[in-house]
Image (cartoon, rainbow, N blue to C red):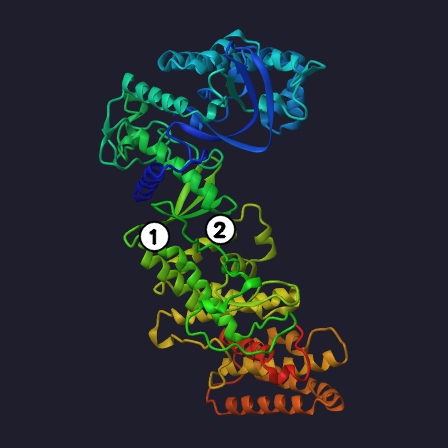
Amino acid sequence: MSWMQKLYRTYEFVQKQGLDDEELALPFHLSKAVHLKVVLNDKAELVRAERFEGKKQVPIQVTEKSSKRSGSTIAAYALHDGLQYIAKTAERYLTIEYLSKVAEKDNGKKWKEFLTGTDEEKQTFAEAEKTKYQSCFEFYEKQLSDWAEFSHLQEIDIILRYVQKGSLIEDLIDKKYFSFEDNILLSGKDDPFGLTIVWAVDMPSDPHSDLWSKSNIKSQWIKYQESQSEQGNKSKELCYITGEEDYPVEAYPKIDGNAKVVSANDDTGFTFRGRFYGDKDNGAKSELGSQAVILGRGVSQKAFNMLKWLIKHQGISNGDQKTVVWAISGKEVPSPMKDSFGVIDWDNLDTSAVENEEEMPSETNISGKDWSSSVGQKAAEIIKKKLHGYRVNLENHEQISLLVLDKSTDGRMALTYYQEFLPADYFANLDAWIDDFSWYQRYKPKDGKPWLFAAPSIERIADTILSKSELEDKSKKAKKQLYTRLLPVIAGGKKVPIPYDLVQKSFQTACNPNSVEHWEWQRNIGVACALYKGWRARHHDLSQRRTYLMSLDTENRSRDYLFGRLLAVAEKLESTALWIADEKRSTNAERYMQRFAVRPLSTWLQIELSLEPYKNRLRSNRYMGFLRNREKEIDEIMAALNELNSPLDKPLDGEFLLGYHSQRMAYRNSPNTTSEQDEQE
């Protein structure tokens, strides 16, 4: 339960710092979306109502039970709630006409049965709903009355008096906020019974009327809830988080929708309980959960309220999967899930931020900025320095927590990953990810945008590895699994290798340029190169580990690397000839790339033959210097290949893409080629 302890300590620290954020709820409070404000005067009369525009979240008072209410459960919030709880006459407006309108919009089983039922069955259904609404109001009124008696707050007394009069809906109709037409209660386009209503009281001596923002009401509710524990039958027990005596929590709050991370109400239907004893027949039902763990009410409220706040403000969502990284001090910590691209201000790129900067070359591309390899490498250093800017704000001993949650069902949320770090270790691990997995990444489909030398984001890896159907799957099952496998690689440091099947999948995708747009293919190559480079850097066999240069390595005599360079030279030669004739189509090198990766030598012989007409075009257009340079490169690479003892026609691995991409980027950034014709990307 270490993660809960860290959440609790974070809440305590933030509270001491006086963070003024209504969305970070106090104990026995819940941040809730609200729709309508009803304003009363000190005589318990409705003065006006105000509809909130957009999404308005406010903290409302809740009980343990109402914080997790769902479905048919009757559990009122303390003060602000829906009409079925706060309006005494709500049941009168549950007409057959209104219920029919609801049923037409709802696909639930009970509503389908209502629509197909007889008039008598519909009337029976309506009476049951009315009885439920009466029970809701009685529950709310009793709870509010008890709180008013305990707190002696004037505002609560005013709300209670008005609620007991039972004129809320009628007053709202009278003031034109609601309407009752054709036996149906309406609130514009909204269903009145779907609105959450909050209270405000205009007091002559108090300029602040909104009850949800008043600290005395919040504190009195917390005291009231604590007093309820003392008056109950429960005794204090040892809290497993604080090590102190506290009243044990009986109901755990929902975190996302109706999903809860901790639940202890499953006490039947087990085939094996292990060390857990007792059952509902012998009176030991309530003991089953406590045999596993006991949490104090205060700890539970604070820890889960902190978790909900972190998910909303600092969480990264992948469907129902939520990733949160935080420091106990509440200070911002960079997430391993975020893209490095956003760290760089490309319009004001300042390479002086990197120490020992060498003089930048003057050649520029179409954008007017130099995105050569030196700037790309500086960008990687800038990213690391930017990340370490967060490190400065943290104490050396301050712990960083990384947590991943995922919904297993609509009502359950599982903790799928949790890790704690000291700041030095956490940022060293992020540095290792950048160092090991950085490669040229294509970010924008438009001309003139930068190639960033950085580690690919987890989102870009998913776009490369997963199929279209997997990416479009609403459940995001494959994407969640991929994120779960990659997160330890990013956050775990150099000792955590990347799974080879992901490397191989990215390689296969990158070798197939024919199924995607050109810029997407460039992105796929960048991702595949990065993953292979990182896989080699962290290979479990030390003899197989390799470190690759960030630029073209003309001394590399690996068969795969040389074949990659060879294909890039052929592609450059043909693309230049096509550019001269203003032909916009794929080169033979691109079209045959997938086959080349499987049978490099035999495929090369075919590509080489197809280059002859393009060589003739270059000769006739006075590109002899360019052509001689490319032919010289081909001869040098072939000579190096012929010196190797290994079979030349066996399938290639990811190093082939490193050679190919390095050669391409060398052309893109070299003035020796751009002086004769512009590089078109």
User: In the figure, residue 276 lies in which quadrant?
Assistant: top left
Left or right of residue 356: residue 678: right
**Does any portion of residue 498 appear in the rendered image?**
no
Q: Tell me whether circle 2 and circle 1 mark residues in contact (CB < 8 Å).
A: no
Q: Earlier in the sequence, mark 2 or mark 1?
A: 1
**In the figure, 183 relative to 293: above or below?**
above
Towards the viewer: 446 or 205 = 205
Mark 1 residue type: Leu
Relative image position of residue 568 (x, y in whole percent): 60, 80
Mark 1 Cα-neighbour bin, 10 Å: few <14, some 14–19, many ≥20: many
Mark toward the viewer: 2 or 1: 1
Towards the viewer: 486 or 178 = 178
Towards the viewer: 342 or 634 = 342
Which type of secondary structure does the marked residue at label 2 adopt? helix
Mark 2 residue type: Lys
Q: Residue furthest front?
A: 205
Mark 2 Cα-neighbour bin, 10 Å: few <14, some 14–19, many ≥20: some
Q: Residue furthest top?
A: 165
Towards the viewer: 205 or 139 = 205
Relative image position of residue 376 (x, y in whole percent): 51, 71
- The quarter of the picture where the C terminus appears is bottom right
**Does any portion of residue 238 appear in the rendered image?**
yes
Residue at image location 73% in from the left, 79% down from the top: 578
Label of residue 480 in the image: 2
- The quarter of the picture where the N terminus appears is top left
Label of residue 394 in the image: 1
Which type of secondary structure does the marked residue at label 1 adopt? loop
